[in-house]
């Protein structure tokens, strides 16, 4: 944190860098600049700590809040687009999701059986790492002519029901593919969890968490609910 900070925010369960920036009327780039330890993709945001949301000489603006004059995409598909949305949504969307507290891109795509690449393509304003997903707005979760793909949903049939216990430690199920085979301690992912909060609760580094759970991706974009992740190895 910078030493010229003059306003602070206490990080609570369910907070993300984008929502903190929105609540305090600052840009995401300002938040990252004033709190360099959280990284450039919010991977180092910890629970129950204070972060900087203003520095000496800064005048709060509303540039990061969802615009009150949001323009709807022209409904070329005959389907009315709800409001508010963030600018940039494709104009052939035929299904929408209202972003609530605790949502993140990986959770949304899991719910609707679409891929992250599709979600980012249909909602470019959220960024390529979900850094600008706004609360209380609608995002696109389907376009005309596209059916959900089973490969991106967390179907029971695609989750391993048994895991080789080559290390002598019984591995609970379900888990996501990519967990290290030398895991000895596990954490069940619940609604509101993110990689940083899980790592903090387990007393491990975020780098180790990603190393032991490669299936979650390099920026927590594929952390699935209701599965076990590794938080300690032999």
Image: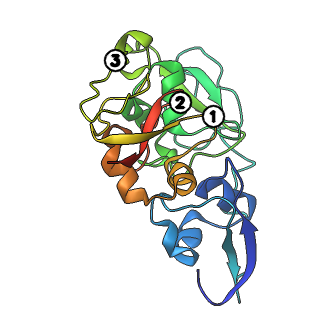
Task: Identify the mark nearer the N-term, 3 or 1.
Answer: 3
Q: Position of residue 6 (x, y in %)?
A: 74, 84
Distance in Å between CA atoms under marks 3 and 1 = 24 Å
Q: Position of residue 220 (x, y in %)?
A: 44, 46
The residue tagged 2 is 225
Write down the quadrant of residue 153 in the picture. Answer: top left
Write down the quadrant of residue 166 in the picture. Answer: top left
> Mark 2 and mark 3 in contact (Cβ < 8 Å)?
no
Q: Nearer the viewer, mark 3 or mark 2?
A: 3
Q: In the displayed image of the protein, which residue is found farthest to the left?
A: 166
The residue tagged 1 is 191
Q: Position of residue 161 (x, y in %)?
A: 37, 15
Distance in Å between CA atoms under marks 1 and 2 = 6 Å
> Mark 2 and mark 1 in contact (Cβ < 8 Å)?
yes
Which secondary structure lies at badge 2?
loop
| Residues packed near mark 1 inside 10 Å, few (<14), some (14 to 19) or many (20 plus) | few
Task: Identify the mark nearer the N-term, 1 or 2.
Answer: 1
Write down the quadrant of residue 74 in the picture. Answer: top right
Q: Report the residue at 71% width, 89% height from top.
A: 56
Which secondary structure lies at badge 3?
loop
Q: Report the residue at 62% width, 27% height from top.
A: 97
Instruction: State the residue in front, 125 or 107.
Output: 107
In the displayed structure, 223 sits above or below 156; it is below
Residue 162 is marked as 3
In the displayed structure, 210 sits above or below 61; it is above
> Mark 1 and mark 3 in contact (Cβ < 8 Å)?
no
| Residues packed near mark 2 inside 10 Å, few (<14), some (14 to 19) or many (20 plus) | some
Q: Report the residue at 60% width, 24% height from top.
A: 96
Instruction: State the residue in front, 7 or 72.
Output: 7
Task: Identify the mark nearer the N-term, 3 or 2.
Answer: 3
């Amino acid at each position: 944190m910078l030493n010229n900070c003059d306003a602070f925010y206490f990080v609570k369960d369910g907070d993300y860098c984008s929502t903190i920036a929105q609540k305090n009327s600052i840009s995401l780039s300002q938040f990252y600049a004033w709190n360099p330890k959280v990284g450039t993709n919010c991977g180092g945001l910890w629970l129950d700590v204070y972060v900087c949301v203003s520095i000496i000489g800064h005048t709060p603006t509303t540039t990061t809040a969802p615009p009150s004059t949001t323009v709807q995409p022209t409904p070329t598909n005959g389907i009315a687009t709800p409001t508010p949305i963030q600018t940039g949504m494709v104009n052939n969307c035929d299904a929408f999701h209202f972003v609530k507290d605790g949502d993140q891109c990986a959770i949304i795509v899991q719910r609707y059986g679409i891929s992250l690449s599709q979600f980012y393509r249909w909602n470019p304003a959220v960024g390529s790492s979900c850094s600008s997903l706004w609360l209380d707005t609608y995002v696109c979760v389907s376009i005309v002519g596209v059916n959900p793909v089973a490969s991106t949903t967390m179907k029971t049939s695609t989750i391993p029901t048994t895991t080789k216990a080559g290390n002598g430690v019984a591995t609970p199920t379900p888990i996501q593919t990519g967990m290290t085979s030398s895991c000895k301690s596990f954490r069940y992912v619940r609604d509101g969890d993110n990689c940083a909060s899980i790592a903090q609760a387990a007393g491990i580094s975020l780098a180790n968490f990603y190393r032991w759970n490669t299936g979650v991706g390099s920026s927590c974009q594929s952390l699935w609910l209701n599965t076990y992740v590794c938080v300690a190895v032999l």
